[in-house]
Image (spheres, rainbow, N blue to C red):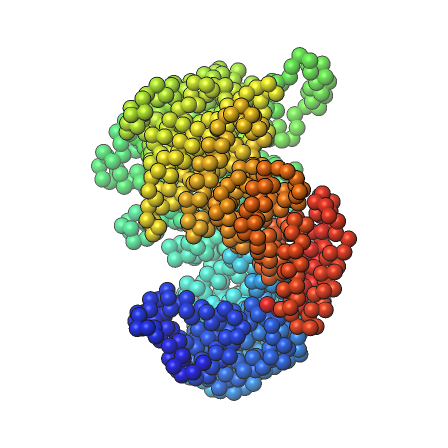
């Protein structure tokens, strides 16, 4: 590279990063995209490494040096095996020297890139030479130089820990763990010590620096400490997205440092004297330190001493409230408190000095935090987690252990915390209302709300009677006030009341919402395990549930008596649904046992079960049954059937009177679906009058939500649930209607639509009925899981109503909403799940079903192909064109791969249904540009799945294609093979395997298919060789997720074209050094030893094992 070329690179970099216009050598203006493409060429070959070094040495542009550095990272990673060990060390030393000489003057983004480069070299060359393992020692020189060099050294160490902890793309997990474990054993402790030493020097003012430098040094040293403690010591690959810290599996060699009181004191002192974000980082380090594995300490005494220091530091912070006025510090401190009991057993905590004082201070802090909820919404659940974990462990600790009277003291603090929580959350309603939108309502923060509710059951049940009384003392007055406010309103909406009444109503409904959520969470926390069933808890559940159910009755009465005008706050409705869901889970699973129902026992089986029933009667009710019975007796609202009917009636009225509220409709239907899924609860539902009403009147007239366009998705869920109930054992008998009667409203609409002419069918008035019918049918079809029920639906639709599908596809092809609902129903209808599409041997229904499918796909496909596609840059192109195209391919894929059609019949009887469907589907696939196929995942999966089925079961059609078309398909398969999506690459690999297997098994035979395939291979003789080369390149150099997919066709390709494999083998050997050539020959000889010329499964499996061993061996030494 010369000065002129360097200037051109600098100009391109300016264009890329700043948008500054520049021209090329021909005077043409270069766009940002063009500049990027030209600069990416620096990453294309290892030959550009000297040019990158030239740019770093001679350019004054930070951007051009950044491009050079990033290019070096890519080149080093990809072409690592192309360098000798001395060359690798030279590059490492060059970058380190460059950083030492120029680092302090460089901008941060360039420094970071160069540091990443040296760390990547260190990782990849870790086992090449001891020099690479001495980076921590080399960085020590940086730490001992100027302050700016010290900052640079800490940045290098931070990046080094990250680099060795996080897997690198292109390297196997085994290689990564081998390097990571070696780094852990050789260097990590030293790096950790360097971080702590720097913190100590900052604390003692041993480093002379200005305030800005001190801040950066502190932040980098703390980040290094946190990274070292967060290191994946044992290869568990922890989830970084979660805030919850696991146990820190520090090696035994770390014991002296972690056990040293000075380490804990240093972090606490640094927290106390620093400002955010350094102080919050110090707190994060303390959290990690507190989570160190218990086996690290040689004796319980050592662990107790460590816990004592930790609790001493926490107590001091609670007393002085050090730094807790800062949001980040406060949040991290809440995490520390929440983590404390997770890391230590209660038996250890109660023995710690000052435990009772700690409890009192923690309770005071929790109370203060809850009272100031507007500043701590996202942190409260950590504090609740502390109390939940403390009380959960009380049964496992002897009362005389540790501090005297620790259990009563804990009871006192828990009651204080819960009283404050209930009061504060109820008080938050009025505070938010009077803030006029200035404060966020905690009820609207679904994530934090659920986190808090998850913690409540354990805390409340520790002193259940007293906490329940707190709730009841709030619930009863509010319920009475709510009734008093509702009475004057009568059938009028709340919005018609005076302003002060509306405001009072909003406050009471908000407070009742909180209480209903709390009651739902606590009742849902009831445990049926014998060890945790405390006497009398079910009666407390009953007392709380009575209030929640009375509230639901009151809300429902006003809703129905006002014909939907007297609605409550939607959030109160959602809280009631939350309560119903928890009540269902705990108290609606024993209905069949309690009812004494022996329904479903036939006369033939009666004698065989008499003895079993008698033995059950003799033994008397079980403990669970007694608790269950006591709960409903104490509830005082009737038995389980009456209560279930109350709940389901409320759900039915939700569906009737809240049509526009999608959140309420969705949660109501989810609850109904969950109840229908349960064995006992589904049998209970069948006895309820409300469910019978739902099944008999599942139309828009009775349930207006079905007519709301935004609820079309809910129509599917609604009908799927009702169908599941109807088709359950004795469902038709108990609901009083047959499957045919259930479908009658839908069939009637289909009959009316089917009688219309194409012109009338296209009328806008038909849009909603069509969408509704197909959505409903999709839900019904989704609940058919066996041959009998599926045949029932097929017999209803065929022959009178299935022709409507093709007619709709033809006339509504350009309306996405209609065509998508049609295709999704047909996709479900054609799907042979659980082998449900299984007609009698003499039945033509399978062929008739495929004919219908073919008609729909052809009608839609032909219309789609006749419509000019939108411009390639159109953002709506997927919605307008590709979504329907992908779905139609999925429909055809389900039909072609369902194993319920003998496709040979079509050709035998000159039926064009199969040929037409394949022809239209091929035309649709070929009409999509390759870039668009790869841009839309759902489209690409449907596309490649169709190609795979075509080559698997319909070789005659596939091989009969024109050579240009055939090669176009193979080009897309070649591209798809290299996809990062393992599913797509598997489809493509299987396609190649089908073709190669067919060629090998039928070579030399006089078949039309073979003649056509030979014609294609004659026109494109290098097809097999290019596929072989791509497969082996993916195997040797590609990402790990594709390895299994690409292995399958390798053997069939090798046997189909041995010359292709020989040519690739010879080429690969010539690209390697003499030493590598010997190793490669040995590996290939092992691979080919004992390979039989057969494609039976045993030979394939044996070859795949050998291929895996070959890949692992070859990747360790091959160069690109």
Residue sitting at the far top = 603
Quick one: quadrant of the C terminus?
Answer: bottom right
Residue at 55 percent across and 20 percent down: it is 844
Vertical placement of residue 891 versus 793, above or below: below
Q: Can see residue 749?
A: no
Vertical placement of residue 288 versus 12, above or below: above
> Would residue 263 be found to the left or right of residue 445 on screen?
right
Q: Quadrant of residue 247?
A: bottom right
Residue sitting at the far right = 1090
Q: Can see residue 102?
A: yes
Vertical placement of residue 1095 versus 497, above or below: below
- The one nearer the camera, 560 or 859, is 859
| Residue 177: percent from left, percent from top | 65, 64
| Residue 557: percent from left, percent from top | 36, 26
Residue at 50 percent across and 68 percent down: it is 44
Residue at 41 percent across and 27 percent down: it is 805
- The one nearer the camera, 215 or 910, is 910
Q: Quadrant of residue 806?
A: top left
Quick one: quadrant of the N terminus?
Answer: bottom left
Residue at 44 percent across and 73 percent down: it is 67
- The one nearer the camera, 960 or 1049, is 960
| Residue 999: percent from left, percent from top | 63, 44
């Amino acid at each position: 590279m010369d000065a002129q070329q360097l200037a051109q690179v600098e100009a391109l970099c300016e264009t890329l990063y700043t948008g500054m216009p520049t021209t090329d050598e021909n005077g043409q203006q270069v766009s940002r995209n063009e500049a990027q493409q030209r600069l990416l060429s620096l990453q294309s070959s290892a030959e550009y490494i000297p040019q990158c070094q030239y740019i770093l040495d001679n350019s004054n542009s930070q951007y051009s040096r950044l491009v050079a550095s990033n290019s070096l990272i890519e080149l080093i990673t990809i072409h690592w095996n192309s360098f000798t060990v001395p060359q690798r060390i030279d590059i490492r030393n060059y970058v380190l020297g460059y950083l030492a000489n120029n680092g302090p003057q460089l901008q941060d983004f360039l420094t970071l890139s160069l540091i990443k480069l040296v760390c990547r070299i260190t990782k990849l060359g870790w086992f090449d030479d001891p020099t690479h393992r001495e980076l921590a020692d080399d960085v020590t020189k940086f730490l001992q130089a100027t302050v700016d060099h010290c900052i640079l050294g800490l940045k290098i160490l931070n990046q080094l820990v990250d680099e060795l902890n996080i897997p690198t793309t292109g390297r196997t997990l085994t290689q990564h763990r081998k390097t990571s474990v070696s780094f852990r054993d050789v260097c990590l402790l030293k790096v950790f010590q360097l971080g702590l030493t720097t913190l100590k020097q900052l604390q003692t003012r041993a480093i002379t620096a200005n305030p800005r430098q001190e801040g950066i040094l502190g932040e980098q040293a703390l980040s290094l400490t946190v990274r070292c403690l967060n290191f994946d010591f044992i290869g568990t690959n922890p989830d970084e997205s979660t805030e919850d810290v696991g146990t820190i599996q520090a090696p035994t060699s770390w014991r002296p440092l972690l056990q040293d009181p000075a380490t804990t004191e240093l972090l606490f002192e640094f927290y106390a004297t620093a400002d955010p974000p350094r102080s919050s980082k110090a707190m994060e380090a303390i959290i990690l330190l507190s989570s160190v594995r218990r086996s690290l300490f040689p004796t319980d005494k050592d662990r107790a001493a460590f816990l004592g220091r930790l609790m001493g530091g926490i107590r001091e912070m609670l007393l002085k409230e050090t730094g807790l006025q800062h949001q980040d510090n406060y949040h991290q401190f809440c995490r520390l408190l929440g983590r404390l009991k997770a890391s230590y057993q209660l038996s250890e905590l109660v023995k710690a000095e000052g435990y009772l004082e700690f409890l009192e201070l923690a309770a005071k802090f929790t109370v203060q935090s809850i009272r100031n909820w507007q500043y701590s919404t996202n942190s409260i659940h950590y504090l609740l987690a502390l109390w939940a974990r403390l009380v959960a462990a009380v049964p496992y600790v002897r009362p005389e252990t540790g501090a005297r009277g620790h259990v009563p003291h804990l009871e006192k603090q828990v009651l204080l915390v819960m009283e404050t929580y209930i009061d504060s959350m109820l008080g938050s309603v009025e505070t938010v209302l009077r803030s006029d939108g200035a404060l966020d309502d905690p009820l609207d923060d679904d994530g934090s709300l659920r986190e808090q509710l998850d913690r409540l059951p354990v805390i409340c049940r520790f002193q259940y009677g007293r906490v329940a009384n707190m709730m009841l003392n709030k619930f009863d007055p509010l319920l009475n006030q709510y009734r008093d406010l509702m009475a004057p309103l009568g059938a009028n909406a709340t919005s018609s009341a005076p302003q002060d009444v509306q405001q009072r109503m909003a406050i009471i409904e908000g407070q009742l919402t909180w209480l209903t959520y709390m009651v739902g969470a606590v009742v849902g926390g009831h445990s049926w395990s014998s060890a945790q069933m405390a006497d009398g808890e079910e009666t407390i559940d009953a007392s709380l549930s009575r209030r929640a159910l009375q509230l639901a009755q009151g809300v429902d009465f006003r809703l129905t008596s006002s014909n939907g005008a007297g609605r409550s706050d939607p959030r109160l409705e959602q809280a009631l649904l939350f309560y119903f869901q928890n009540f269902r889970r705990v108290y609606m699973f024993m209905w069949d046992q309690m009812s004494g129902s022996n329904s479903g026992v036939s006369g033939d089986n009666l004698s065989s079960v008499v003895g079993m029933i008698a033995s059950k009667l003799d033994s008397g009710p079980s403990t669970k049954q007694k608790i269950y019975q006591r709960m409903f007796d104490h509830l005082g609202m009737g038995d389980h059937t009456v209560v279930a009917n109350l709940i389901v009636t409320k759900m039915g009225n939700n569906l009737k009177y809240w049509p526009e509220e999608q959140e309420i409709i969705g949660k109501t239907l989810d609850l109904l679906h969950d109840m229908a899924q349960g064995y006992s609860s589904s049998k209970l539902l069948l006895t309820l009058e409300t469910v019978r009403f739902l099944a008999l009147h599942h139309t828009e007239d009775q349930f207006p939500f079905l007519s709301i366009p935004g609820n079309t998705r809910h129509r599917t869920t609604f009908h799927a649930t009702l169908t599941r109930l109807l088709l359950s054992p004795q469902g038709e008998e108990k609901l009083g209607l047959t499957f045919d009667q259930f479908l009658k409203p839908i069939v009637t609409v289909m009959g009316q639509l089917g009688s219309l002419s194409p012109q009338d069918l296209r009328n806008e008035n038909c849009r909603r009925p069509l969408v509704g019918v197909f959505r409903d049918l999709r839900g019904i079809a989704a609940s058919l899981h066996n041959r009998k029920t599926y045949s029932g639906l097929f017999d209803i639709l065929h022959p009178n109503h299935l022709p409507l599908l093709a007619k709709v596809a033809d006339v509504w092809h350009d309306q996405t909403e209609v065509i998508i609902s049609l295709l999704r129903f047909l996709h479900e209808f054609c799907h042979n799940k659980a082998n449900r599409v299984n007609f009698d041997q003499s039945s033509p229904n399978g062929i008739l079903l495929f004919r219908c499918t073919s008609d729909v796909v052809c009608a839609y496909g032909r219309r789609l192909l006749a419509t000019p596609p939108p411009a390639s840059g159109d953002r709506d192109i997927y919605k307008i064109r590709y979504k329907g195209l992908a779905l139609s391919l999925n429909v055809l894929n389900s039909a072609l791969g369902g194993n319920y059609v003998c496709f040979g019949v079509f050709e035998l009887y000159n039926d064009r249904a199969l040929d037409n469907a394949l022809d239209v589907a091929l035309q649709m696939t070929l009409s999509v540009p390759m870039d668009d196929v790869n841009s839309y995942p759902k489209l690409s999966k449907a596309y490649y799945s169709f190609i795979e089925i075509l080559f698997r079961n319909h070789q005659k059609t596939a091989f009969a294609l024109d050579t240009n078309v055939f090669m176009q398909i193979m080009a897309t398969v070649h591209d798809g093979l290299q996809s990062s999506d393992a599913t797509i690459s598997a489809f493509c690999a299987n396609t190649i395997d089908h073709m190669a297997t067919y060629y090998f098994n039928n070579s030399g035979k006089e078949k039309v298919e073979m003649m056509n395939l030979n014609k294609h291979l004659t026109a494109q003789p290098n097809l097999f060789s290019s596929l072989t080369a791509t497969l082996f390149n993916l195997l040797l150099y590609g990402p790990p997720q594709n390895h299994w997919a690409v292995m399958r066709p390798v053997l069939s390709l090798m046997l189909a074209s041995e010359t292709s494999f020989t040519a690739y083998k010879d080429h690969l050997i010539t690209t390697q050094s003499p030493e590598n050539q010997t190793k490669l020959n040995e590996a290939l000889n092992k691979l080919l030893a004992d390979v039989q010329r057969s494609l039976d499964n045993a030979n394939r499996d044996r070859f795949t094992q050998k291929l895996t061993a070959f890949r692992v061996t070859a990747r360790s030494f091959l160069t690109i």
